[in-house]
């Protein structure tokens, strides 16, 4: 069980008392610190005094202030702009999901939900938020001399090495915090789905079972995978920076992942490539069979 300092804090917003009770029970049993609000207006009152949440589980249809109105207000405030919002809804129509995605709700939970899926989605959202905060804290401690880097080639194998390389290369960019999140996603994807050959459906299942990290560690040690490396080339060219990331895997069909589609909104993963493209880089382009990706940043 996590210690109080490690426990993630979740705000649940729902106008149905039964939903508040069952959602709270599941999350408290899992070790989360939970606060509740009965509608958007009550939630905004909570957030006005308490800003330290790792994720917000938000019902769409509510009186006074509904979920979309609260989401819009959250995204206008710098202190809440990057707090992940999990939109829970009984309406699964694609147009409703697209509306939420466009407004910044990258995680979705459809009612009635399964406990395992609820926990997998919340864990993914919390991990995203904490990873971002940790990267930002580490980036602020790094020397700006990394921006003198002109060209470099790097080879790595593990997720920890991906994190260290993210910190180094992000600091070579004008906006390290913006670049770090997307670069981390591309490097991690090259390890997990590229070199280790874990498919999209396998990752979904492993996350729901709580076995994802164990499977990654097992494959990193397996004879079929332990010699594989990811190669990253960094180049500072006239007017832009270029990252080329190549893994030794079999490749994949990357086209569906450039945009974050409503069909994957209810999965606990599958946002990395589209979020890197939307938030971190001016261009993300996969090449060939999908085991090489080039990302560009324009320099002002």
Image: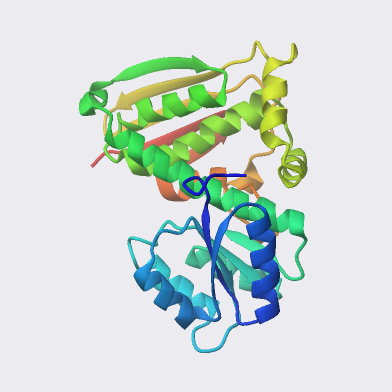
The answer to whether residue 289 is visible is no
Which of the image's four quarters has the C terminus?
Answer: top left
Image spot of residue 82 (x, y percent): 42, 56
Quadrant of the image occupied by residue 214: top right
Above or below residue 95? Residue 245 is above
Above or below residue 105? Residue 211 is above
Q: Nearer the viewer, residue 29 or 125?
A: 29
Above or below residue 88? Residue 227 is above
Image spot of residue 178 (x, y percent): 36, 44
Residue at figure coordinates x 73%, y 70% from the top left: 111
Q: Is residue 201 left or right of residue 160?
A: right
The answer to whether residue 182 is visible is yes
Q: How many marks?
A: 0
Q: Is residue 228 left or right of residue 209?
A: left
Residue at figure coordinates x 72%, y 29% from the top left: 215
Image spot of residue 226 (x, y percent): 67, 13
Image spot of residue 33 (x, y percent): 54, 58
Tell me which colouring the rendered structure shows: rainbow
Q: Nearer the viewer, residue 205 or 2?
A: 2
Quadrant of the image occupied by residue 287: top right
Q: Nearer the viewer, residue 238 or 147?
A: 147
Quadrant of the image occupied by residue 15: bottom right
Q: Is residue 167 left or right of residue 245?
A: left
């Amino acid at each position: 069980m996590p210690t109080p300092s490690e426990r993630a804090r979740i705000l649940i917003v729902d106008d149905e008392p039964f939903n508040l009770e069952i959602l709270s029970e599941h999350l408290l049993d899992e070790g989360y610190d939970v606060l509740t609000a009965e509608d958007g207006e009550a939630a905004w009152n909570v957030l006005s005094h308490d800003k330290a949440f790792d994720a917000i589980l938000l019902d769409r249809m509510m009186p006074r202030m509904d979920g979309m109105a609260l989401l819009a207000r959250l995204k206008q405030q710098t202190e809440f702009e990057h707090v992940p919002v999990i939109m829970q809804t009984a309406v699964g129509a694609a147009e409703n999901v697209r509306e939420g995605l466009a407004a910044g709700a990258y995680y979705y939970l459809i009612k009635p939900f399964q406990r395992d899926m609820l926990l997998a989605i919340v864990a993914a959202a919390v991990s995203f938020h904490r990873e971002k905060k940790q990267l930002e804290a580490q980036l602020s401690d790094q020397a700006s001399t990394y921006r003198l880097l002109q060209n470099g080639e790097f080879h790595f194998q593990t997720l920890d090495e991906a994190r260290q390389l993210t910190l180094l290369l992000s600091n070579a960019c004008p906006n390290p915090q913006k670049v770090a999140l997307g670069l981390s996603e591309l490097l991690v994807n090259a390890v997990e789905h590229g070199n280790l050959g874990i498919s999209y459906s396998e990752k979904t299942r492993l996350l729901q079972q709580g076995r994802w990290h164990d499977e990654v560690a097992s494959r990193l040690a397996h004879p079929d995978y332990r010699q594989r490396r990811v190669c990253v080339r960094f180049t500072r060219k006239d007017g832009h920076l270029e990252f080329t990331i190549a893994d030794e895997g079999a490749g994949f069909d990357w086209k569906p992942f450039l945009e974050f589609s409503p069909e994957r909104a209810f999965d606990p993963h599958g946002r990395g490539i589209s979020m890197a493209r939307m938030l971190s880089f001016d261009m993300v382009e996969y090449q060939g069979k999908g085991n090489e990706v080039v990302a560009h940043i324009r320099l002002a």
